[in-house]
Structures are given as structure tokens and as C-alpha cells.
Amino acid sequence: MIIRNVTVVDGTGGEPLTGAEVEVTDGRFTAVRPVTAQESATAQEPAIDGRGGWLVPGLWESHAHLSGFAIFQPEDKRVGHVSEALAGFARAGITSVVNLGGPLDLELAVREHRRTATDPAAELYFAGPVFTGINGWPVQDRVEMAPAGHQIDDPDVAYRLALDLADQVDVIKCIYDGEPGSPTKLPRAALRAVAAAAHEKGRKVLVHVCRRVDLEEAVEAGADCIEHAFLPEHPDSDAEAVAMAKLLAENGTLYCPTLVTWEQLGRNGEAAYLEELVADGVITADDIPRITGSPMYGRPFPHHPADECRIRFDYAMRTLRMMHEAGVKIVTGSDVSMVMPSPPVALLRELQLLAKAGVPLPAVLAAGTRHAAEKIGLGDEVGTITQGAVADALLLDADPLTDISHLVNPAHHIGVLRKGRFLTTD
């Protein structure tokens, strides 16, 4: 298949290639070239007219909890629930989803289901149960959440469990927040043990943090990506962000701030917030009754007080550009969609928030594509429009490097390429 008449933004950071065509064979990109270099043999290939649009790599949701939330569905509906969610992501141009915490049996069942399903859907990558402390987040006396976590107080046990889990999952996740020394917090030695076991098996380690000290200790332990913008001790000073930017950049540790998480949890229940989302084109006025009618609307979220969430959001929005300029690789992930009409919308809002924070648009696109693939160790396989990469892409009718709305507003989406299969969004 040939996609003609496009400008290719390949996700590598290079200049866009105008007047290009892209060749796809067996679900992978096999050539990206100017039309003038077209060989006569390609004239016979099935062709798609790109309409003079922009072709960018398929977007990534690198911090989701589809299987975790599916626990609350009837057991016989859970696989279908997650599968349909993955189909919804694909329709939104989000071609890869990383599920960071859930029952392993459910995630394996979804993957098996997707092997024979015929409807297009985002690729699912998953972590299985997270490593946490005894009765730590997200378990915390919620019996139904027990399959989503390994509760650890012994480094040797952590190491053995991580070795076994690494053979069954795509990535390993640890929850590392809470009061030092509390049994609910994963012991520091256990965090090191999990990271060592994961790396021994070639798996990346993603670590959920709360405070600066959690971030520092996670990096020291070998974290490959820090999940969530940290809660600063001194919100009026940028000094902590400067120090953490230096630490992350020097160690090559990626940073997934989940801005939209803190925005939603900090402003859940505010009418003005919904009005802002409408003004930004994230939701429509017609979405508001459904949002406000949700049982979670306006309710406090366990483990994350609203005032702390607002601090985390405001601090990250103020300092993310500086962190980018310091060399930190930023990654997109949305975590929850409590105030959003759907999980895909939450991810698109995350991209918009990165731009609002002053992250340059090429770096925003990298955060939602190449960096997300690197986060789970697949940077050579997917996340770019380059020879040999999985043929996932989003076709837009306007330049995403001049206006973030051209990337996140579905009105600008012409179609989605998923493993070489082209899906129109008209």
C-alpha cells in the first residue's frame, strides 16, 4: 500500500518531508520518500490519497488503567469492556495503550481476545499487578483491588515475584509513595530488588511517586520512567524542579507527569473547569450533563486530596518547559478520565496541557509517540514513521507543529493507520 500526497512528520525530530509518499508492506513502513523518487512499479500498488495532509506517528496512551477499572464490571463483561475501550482509542488516533496496573489474568485474556478480533483497536501493553507496600495503594483495604497489586515487605520475595512477572508482561510498575518506614510504602530495598529483576529480564521499570524524595530514590533504584508530577515541598520555588530536571536528564530517566490527572482531581466539581474544557474544545456543552451526572463527579478521590492535586498541577505546568529545556524526555499519560467523556479524550487533553505548559510542539508530539515507545523499550519497533517500524500513524488535515489543536481536535483527523490498515474518521 502507498499513501501519497502527504507531509511526513516522522517523529524522529527531523524536518518534515513535504510532497512525500509512504509505502507500507505487511503492517510495517517500508519506505518514506519524496514523490519525485517514486519508482514506476509503485504505480500499481493500492494507493491512498493523503489529501495534502500531515502524517504523524500513531499516538500513545502510556499510563492507563483499563483493566483496573474493569474489575468493577461483571466478570463476564470485563474482557469485552477493555477490548471496546481499545477500539475507542484507535478511533481517536491513539494506536498504543500501556495499562499500568491490573489483574494479570484479565490482561492476558484481553490480549488473547484481540489476537482473533477483527475490529481495529489500539495495541495493548501491560504491567500486570503493581508492586506496593502492605495494604498500600491501590489496595488499601479494597478487596476487589487485591489482584491488581503485589503487597511486599521483603526484598527477596519482591525479586522472585518480579523475575516471574517479567516473563508475562511488557513492563514492570512499582508504587513508591507514602511515609518512609510505613508498612504501606514499598521498602526501598524491595524497589531496588524489583528494578534489578526487571532489568535482568530486559523489562523497563516505571515508578509512581509522590514527593521529591520518592523521585530521587526511584531514580537511584534504577527507574526508567517516573510516573506523575511530584508534589513539591516549596510550591513557590522552582528550585526542586531544577534539581529534579538535572537528576532525570543525567540519568536518562523519562518523566510522565500525567497533568490531566491532577487537573481533574484538583478541579473535579468546578463548573468553571467544565466551561474551560468547552472553551478549549476538549468537551462540548452536550457532554456536561453526562459528566455532572456521573457518580464520581464532585467526589473526593481516595489517596489524592484535591488541594495537593492542584499544587502538583500548578507546579508542573509552571516548570515543565524548563525541565524539557534541561533535557528531560517527557512522556504522555492520562491515568484517569473522571471528568472527561472518555479515556481517549483525557489523553488528547494531556497533549494540549503539555503545549499550554510551554513545551514546544515537536517535543509534545515526541512525548506522545517516540518517547512513549522508548518508555517500554520499543523505541526501535514503533512510535516513528521510519523504515521497519510498525505502520501506526494518524493523518491530519493541518500542520500539528503550528497549532496543538491540529493534533488533538478530532475535526482535523482524516484517518488512522493501524498496523497498515487505514481507517477513515470522516
Image (cartoon, helix red, strand yellow):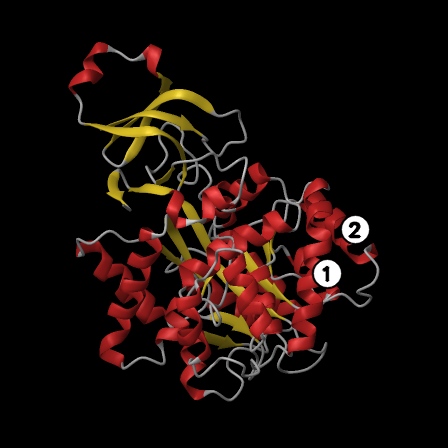
In this view of the protein, which residue sits in the foreground, 98 or 332? 332
Q: Position of residue 236 (x, y in %)?
A: 83, 63
- Going by the image, does 80 lie left or right of 29? left
In this view of the protein, which residue sits in the foreground, 307 or 171? 307
In this view of the protein, which residue sits in the foreground, 308 or 408? 408
Is disc 2 surrounded by few (<14), some (14 to 19) or many (20+) residues within 10 Å? some
| Vertical comparison of 4 with 230: above or below | above
Residue 157 seen from this side:
no
| Amino acid type indicated by mark 2 | Val
Q: How many marks?
A: 2
Q: Nearer the viewer, mark 1 or mark 2?
A: 1
Q: Position of residue 56 (x, y in %)?
A: 42, 36
- Going by the image, does 214 lie left or right of 158? right
The residue sitting at 61% across, 56% down in the picture is 223
Describe the element under mark 1 as helix, strand or loop: helix
| Vertical comparison of 40 with 266: above or below | above
- Going by the image, does 243 lie left or right of 386? right
| Vertical comparison of 336 with 63: above or below | below
| Vertical comparison of 128 with 137: above or below | above
Q: Position of residue 221 (x, y in %)?
A: 65, 58
Residue 112 seen from this side:
yes
Residue corresponding to mark 1 = 315
Residue corresponding to mark 2 = 242
Is disc 1 surrounded by few (<14), some (14 to 19) or many (20+) residues within 10 Å? many
Describe the element under mark 2 as helix, strand or loop: helix
| Amino acid type indicated by mark 1 | Tyr
